[in-house]
Image (cartoon, grey):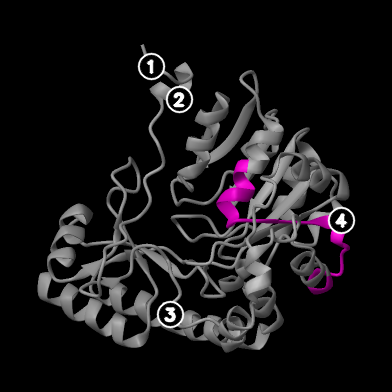
């Protein structure tokens, strides 16, 4: 007999991407930004006083909430901050789902959603994407679940959905629609205007990708004051530490730095896509900082293992429909050069 609830004993935990120690590998497997964060971030960290570390941080990170509110022309009451977007997801699943409730997700998508549903002992309603991996908008709009969550651009495919499609979904369902925009800065559009125009929409962002702060762990969500108030009830008491609050505010204040790096990544994404396609790869039209690439022989797992032997990490998912692809983070130009040299030697 186990010590935990039956659903916890039965479930599998989330498996993150490999994080090897040392510098032997070129890491193109976890969608980290190849460029450093804004210099203002390190300045803010260095200027954080000993007294700030001795005391508890602000419980709701209002300095960042105010910064986000100004960015999107909302109020502090429309923003909640988290220890990365995964913390925000945990809040959302905790606040909306119990054992008798359902959450609707697409397939494929971010696998943490399934894990969080398992923790809540909630039912997972999985809607397969279309044959071309386009999101099933009509079926999402017909959902009767308490929670509908869509990553946009989607992970791991990188494909995106329009704001009009999200408006249609939001106005058709009776539950909460969460748009997980971890990669939105690399795309051409955002669902953020719906976060306040539609009362049941939450839009999430993270500083891990476009702001080069995956090691910091900071994210935020924007929505109606009613939705944000509910999330405040279930968040950890001091979920964002003092260093993270200072660094996040500094990063958000330097939009020019972030956008410059995003433009570099988008340019490199185009080059990587073209180079892989020239070798016969199937590459989806990504709007994120990664590409899904299927090798000509269909042996994605073999390619992943051979690249790893050569010191290059990409992500392989041993799951139906996407097991013929590897997901490749868009790195710096020299990392793309090394990747392509290795791929050419293997194909």
In the rendered structure, the answer to whether residue 62 lies left or right of residue 307 reads right
Q: CA–CA distance between discs 1 and 4? A: 42 Å
Q: In this view, does 74 lie to the left or right of 54?
A: right
Q: Is residue 5 magenta?
A: no
Q: Please tell me which of labels 2 and 3 falls first in the chain.
A: 2
Percent x, y for residue 89?
A: 61, 46
Asked where in the image residue 255 lies, by quadrant, the reply is bottom right
Residue for point 63% across, 67% down: 53
Name the element at disc 2: helix
Q: Position of residue 149 (x, y in %)?
A: 62, 43
Q: Which of marks 1 and 3 is nearer the N terminus?
A: 1
Q: Which quarter shows the N terminus?
A: top left
Can residue 266 be seen here? The reply is yes
Q: What stretch is highlighted in magenta?
A: 70-90
| Image depth: mark 2 or mark 3 in front | 2
The residue sitting at 67% across, 41% down in the picture is: 92
The magenta stretch spans residue 79: yes
Instruction: Look at the numbered discs 4 and 3 and tell me whether their residues touch, using CB distance below 8 Å.
Output: no
Within 10 Å of the Cα at label 3, are there few (<14), some (14-19), or many (20+) other Cα atoms? some
Per the image, the residue denoted by label 3 is 270
Residue 268 pos. (x, y %): 42, 82
The answer to whether 290 appears left or right of 86 in the picture is left
Q: What residue is pinned by disc 4?
A: 77
Of 132 and 64, which appears nearest the observer?
64
Q: Do the residues labelled 1 and 3 touch (CB within 8 Å)?
A: no
Judging by the rendered image, the residue that carries numbered circle 2 is: 8
The C terminus: image quadrant: bottom left
| Residue at mark 1 | 2
Residue 256, x across and y down, in percent: 65, 88
């Amino acid at each position: 007999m186990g010590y935990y609830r039956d659903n916890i004993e039965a479930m599998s935990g989330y498996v993150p991407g490999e994080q090897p120690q040392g510098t032997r590998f070129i890491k193109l497997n976890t969608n980290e930004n190849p460029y450093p964060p804004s210099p203002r971030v390190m300045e803010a960290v260095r200027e954080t006083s000993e007294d700030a570390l001795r005391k508890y941080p602000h419980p709701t990170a209002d300095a960042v909430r105010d910064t986000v509110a100004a960015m999107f022309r909302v109020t502090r009451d429309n923003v909640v901050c988290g220890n990365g977007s995964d913390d925000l997801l945990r809040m959302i699943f905790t606040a909306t789902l119990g054992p008798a409730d359902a959450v609707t997700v697409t397939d494929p998508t971010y696998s943490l959603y399934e894990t969080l549903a398992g923790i809540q002992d909630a039912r997972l309603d999985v809607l397969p994407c279309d044959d071309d991996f386009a999101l099933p908008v009509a079926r999402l709009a017909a959902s009767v679940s308490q929670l509908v969550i869509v990553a946009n651009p989607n992970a791991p495919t990188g494909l995106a959905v329009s704001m009009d499609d999200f408006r249609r979904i939001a106005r058709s369902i009776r539950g909460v629609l969460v748009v997980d925009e971890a990669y939105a800065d690399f795309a051409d559009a955002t669902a953020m205007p719906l976060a306040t125009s539609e009362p049941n929409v939450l839009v999430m962002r993270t500083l891990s990708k476009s702001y080069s702060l995956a090691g910091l762990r900071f994210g935020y969500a924007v929505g109606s004051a009613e939705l944000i108030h509910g999330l405040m009830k279930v968040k950890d008491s001091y979920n964002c530490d003092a260093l993270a609050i200072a660094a996040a505010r500094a990063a958000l204040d330097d939009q020019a730095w972030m956008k410059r790096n995003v433009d570099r990544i988008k340019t490199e994404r185009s080059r990587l896509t073209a180079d892989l396609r020239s070798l016969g790869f199937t590459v989806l039209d990504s709007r994120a900082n990664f590409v899904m690439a299927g090798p000509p022989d269909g042996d994605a797992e073999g390619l992943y293992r051979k690249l790893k032997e050569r010191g290059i990490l990409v992500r392989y998912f041993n799951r139906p429909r996407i097991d013929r692809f590897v997901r490749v983070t868009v790195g710096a130009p020299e990392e793309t050069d090394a990747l392509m040299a290795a791929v050419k030697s293997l194909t």
